[in-house]
Amino acid sequence: MTQYRIAILSATGAVGSELLRLLDEREFPVAAIRLLASPRSQGKALTFRGDHMPVMAVQESSFEGVDLAFFSAGAEAARKWSPVAQEAGATVIDNSSAFRMEPNVPLIIPEINWHKARKETKYYPVGNCTGIILAMTLAPLRKFGHFRRIVVSTYQSASGAGARAVHELEEQARAFARGDELKPNVLPYPILFNLFSHNSPINDAGYNEEEWKVIHEVRKVLEQPELPIEVTCVRVPVQRAHSMSVNVEFDSPAPSVEAIREAVEAFPGLKLVDDRAANRFPMPMLAAGRDPVLVGRIRKDVSNPNAISLFACGDQLRKGAALNAIQIAEKLVESGYLT
């Protein structure tokens, strides 16, 4: 089997660490790996397949001889280093928003739209984590007819804001136990025993940046550029895994609950969790650290004969980020596109 020379930019971050774990777990054919980060992380070491690997500061020569470069360093770094990596001959899989909405750039979720990939493409963005979980949830429902409108409320974990936000949630729990004041530093408000609108800038239309990404990226992935989507994104005191309440309105009468359950069970990357008798449905504790997006609470919308409601949870560090990146890489290998 052909093996590939890999680089990971921002290897010390939450997504970079998850990429390392998944490359190992999924036995991706790695000939050599180069761990890259900003100069402040130089000198650290990470473990990959039992070996301690040094972290190096990214520079112009970092991508020489690299076949595949995973980026998880943010949009500014992607704009700077992606052209450098591609010029050196690497295919880039980027977890930032830098180029996601460019018309000629495919936004791939392998289970949904791999047909948009091309052998000549050398840059693949990974979509917004919430958008990926929503698109995965909606994908099997397309067989039942055209979507008229999607309404979504999200419940997004602290880890979506990075490892420092998770630490802040944990520290606030310890502070509460001591009787101390809950002091926010990473997030704008205390996250323990609280929830608040997603901590991203608000645009002129009144939507925050996260909501705007979800709307436009899901439209692009599903190839429905005019699909009406209404989203409210909220940060909640959960360590890991995002959740969402989803209402789907069709152009015609909604399918049966049993038909939806069967469609979810048959779709790769989804797992049905829908036990009414036990009142057991998707929850972050079940989704955290797991690959599938969990779907349940499936029911007819009693206010609209054309609509159904459901609840979904997904680990935003795995399917919402690192796993989707690895799956793109696996499909590139499988398709013979990675040369």
Image (cartoon, rainbow, N blue to C red):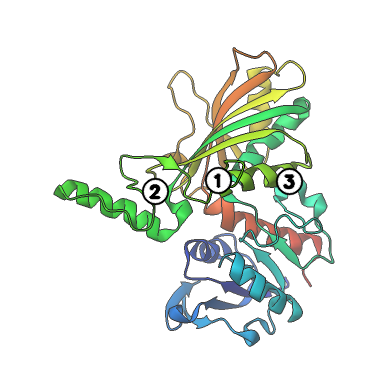
Q: Is residue 68 visible?
A: yes
Q: Provide residue 133's location: percent of width, then percent of height.
A: 60, 43
Instruction: Tell which residue pokes out farthest to the left in this image.
Output: 179
The residue that mark 2 highlights is 239
Alpha carbon of mark 3 to alpha carbon of mark 1: how far?
20 Å
Q: In the picture, residue 152 is in which quadrant?
A: top right
**What amino acid type is highlighted by mark number 1?**
Asn
**What amino acid type is highlighted by mark number 3?**
Val
Q: In front: mark 2 or mark 1?
A: 1
Q: Are the residues tagged 2 and 3 within 8 Å (C-beta)?
A: no
- Which of 107 and 182 lies nearest the eye of the viewer? 182
- Which of 92 and 292 lies nearest the eye of the viewer? 92
**Between disc 2 and disc 3, whose residue precedes?**
3
**Between disc 3 and disc 1, whose residue precedes?**
1
Q: Provide residue 150's location: percent of width, then percent of height.
A: 66, 30
Q: Residue at x 74, y 75 (%)?
A: 86
Q: Are the residues tagged 2 and 1 within 8 Å (C-beta)?
A: no
- Above or below, 123 relative to 307: below
Q: Quadrant of the C terminus?
A: bottom right
**What amino acid type is highlighted by mark number 2?**
Gln
The residue that mark 3 highlights is 221
Q: Residue at x 80, y 57 (%)?
A: 117
Q: Quadrant of the N terminus?
A: bottom right
> Residue 208: which disc?
1
Q: Callout 3: helix, strand or loop?
A: helix
